[in-house]
Image: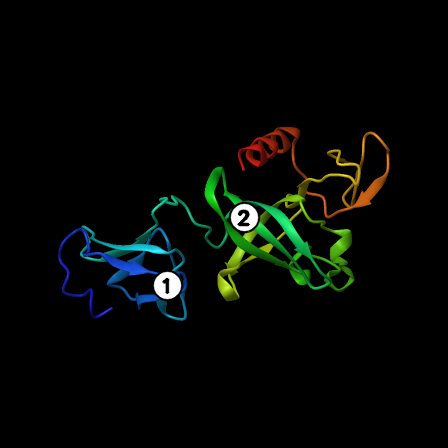
Amino acid sequence: MTSYENSTNTESKCIISTPGQRLCLAEDKYIGGVGTYTRQGYIMSCLAGIVKITAQPDKRILVEVRSGKEQTVVPSAGDIVTARITQVNPRWARCAILCVKEMVLAEPFRGQLRKEDVRATEKDRVEMYKCFRPNDIILARVLSLGDAHSYVLSTAENELGVVIAYSEEGTPMVPVGWQEMQCPKTYVKEMRKVAKVSPEIISNENNKEAAN
């Protein structure tokens, strides 16, 4: 980040970044903030926007990327996120991350849930289409930022998995076990990796989905 090192103002000059752009070395002098992530020893941009550099009281430099729509939060490793499944194949499920913790995102981030991260036990016996279907709403934990700026997710905890799913009739289903949900109209059961959540959480997820 040699081009930034001479900047002593709290606001940087206008520097435009793109997702995946390398901003500076991730060293003691520089710390990544909103709109950035650390990878292979560098602070990277995860947004298209303006780079903001702020001097901190401890003499370190905070590096952030602010988009025009001001995305106020980005997923970080360990965060619980709400996501909508968009595509399923035998090896993984792709999804759109809608919320980080309780914060609804202005724009979704891409996520990927690999077969080996669906549950903690019997990983070799996981059948993705029996765990998730397109348009399911899930709770998942962020493991890392994977390739092509797609966050790697996990549902390997009991509290994570499908919280909202619709039957083939288009009716919201109800959980009837760890691996099944049932349509209340037709009583047809469908396989899912069901999250162990309270009714209040399901109600909150319905509200978040409506917001998106």
SS state under label 2: strand
Residue 207, relative to residue 43: is it above or below?
above
The three-letter amino acid code for the residue at tag 1 is Met
Q: Residue at x 37, y 44 (%)?
A: 69
The residue at which mark 2 appears reads as 97
Residue 40 percent coordinates (x, y): 41, 71
Mark 1 vs mark 2: which is more N-terminal? 1
Is 199 positioned to the left or the right of 75 in the image?
Answer: right
Q: Quadrant of the N terminus?
A: bottom left
Q: CA distance from mark 1 to mark 2?
A: 20 Å
Image-quadrant location for residue 124: bottom right
Residue 67, relative to residue 167: is it above or below?
below
SS state under label 1: strand
The three-letter amino acid code for the residue at tag 2 is Ile
Is 83 positioned to the left or the right of 10 in the image?
Answer: right
Answer yes or no: do the residues labelled 1 and 2 have beta carbons within 8 Å? no
Residue 182 is labelled as none
Q: Residue at x 76, y 54 (%)?
A: 129
Residue 44 is labelled as 1
Is 72 positioned to the left or the right of 185 in the image?
Answer: left
